[in-house]
Amino acid sequence: MEQDKYLVWLSGLKHLGGLRIRRLIEHFGSAKSVWEAGGEDLKKVKGIDRELSRIILASKNEERLKHNMDSLKRHGISTIPLSSVRYPDLLKEIYNPPYLLYVKGNSGVLKRNCIAIVGSRNASYYGKKVAFKLAGQLARAGFTIVSGLARGIDSYAHKGALAVGGSTIAVMGNGLDVIYPRENFQLMKEIPNDGLLLSEYPPGTSPLKGNFPARNRLISGLSLGVVVVEASERSGALITADFALEQNREVFAVPGNINSATSAGTNNLIKEGAKIVNGVEDILEEFPAIVFQSTVNKDSGTGLIRNVTGETENKVLRLIGTQPVHIEQLLAESSLKINELNTLLTYLEVEGHIQRLSGNYFIVRE
């Protein structure tokens, strides 16, 4: 923990970046030794000029150091340095892996077989349904589902894994104490129960636009393969696919309507050689050497919520009806826990029974 606080300090220096942090630690032997180094010694490290040396020296503040560690403890966030046995092996293979990971939840999932599911924020009903079902099927096969917690495809991938009792990793482009997007507040609370929130950014980091391409390299880096469900020609999901190719990962794409802008990117990926996904077996057959030992629910049926029956589903449908109903009212009248209700509502949505309106209102589809 002594070394970790100095790694947290280094990772919070926005001007450095992972490569310079690595050079500093390799040169001085430890993050603590970097803290203790003087200006002239710092400038001996490749990439550290006078200005960066000044920034490093000016950032040394014992009180701030303590504040950083207190913030981690307060938010239930722990750290995994690159040197740790807990650091994911696949991620170590990529170019310039983060020297420090911030995590919240079950870090054991980092040692499991992972598949990424990514796609458009402006997902269609078709895309949401495919992401949800594929994630559930892959989770049942023993995969941990990796995605980026964005609205659209990412959210439905996380929800699909949770729905069958599987695990999922949300890789974020901001600090783990920052709720983004706001609509995924409940999802952020649910994932750490059996899965993991992960970021290379320290607490307090805002979701800046430039953070997300870097975040995407971690999504692919953690995974054996990347499944792109729906993406426009300029979608960030295509950046993840590009990283996957660079990292020698499998790339899969779900075909879509040729007239739909949100399928233009995935259809182009298929044209360029990505494996077409017509069903989960198209993904599973690429990993024949892996013996899956799944711990999730493999029962027939939806497998959504253990202890939730068809009678409960019908009750929730009756509660919703043809007039918009808020989730708080459903929670009060359904006798379900919030995570159970959220999962059931997502299932009913992707099956076409209900429509999700803005502001957490729901209505039955006619």
Image (spheres, grey):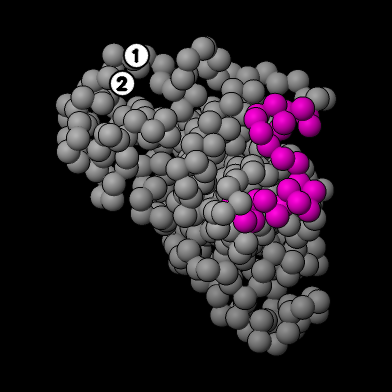
Evaluate whether residue 167 shows in this view: no
Whether residue 273 is in magenta: the answer is yes
Three-letter amino acid code at the position of disc 2? Glu
**Mark 2 touches mark 1? (CB < 8 Å):** yes
Residue 159, horizontal then vertical, whole percent:
46, 36
Q: Nearer the viewer, residue 271 or 312?
A: 271
Q: Nearer the viewer, residue 188 or 248?
A: 248
Q: Nearer the viewer, residue 270 or 26?
A: 270
Residue 288, horizontal then vertical, whole percent:
80, 25
Three-letter amino acid code at the position of disc 1? Thr
Which residue lies at the image location 53% right of the left edge and 31% below the top edge? 133
Which residue lies at the image location 68% right of the left edge and 44% below the top edge? 253
Left or right placement of residue 165 versus residue 330 in this view: right
Circle on res. 313? 2
Which residue lies at the image location 39% right of the left edge and 47% below the top edge? 184
Residue 246, horizontal then vertical, whole percent:
80, 55
Whether residue 229 is in magenta: the answer is no
Q: How many marks?
A: 2
Which residue lies at the image location 58% right of the left edge and 47% below the top edge? 257
Quadrant containing the C terminus in the rendered view:
top left
Q: Which residue is mark 1?
A: 309
Decide: few, some or many residues near mark 1? Use Cα within 10 Å; few <14, some 14-19, many ≥20. few
Circle on res. 21? none
**How far apart are the two marked residues, 2 and 1, measured between alpha carbons?**
7 Å
The residue range painted magenta reads 262-287
Q: Nearer the viewer, residue 90 or 320?
A: 320
Residue 73 sits above or below residue 29 on the image: above
Q: Secondary structure at mark 2?
A: helix
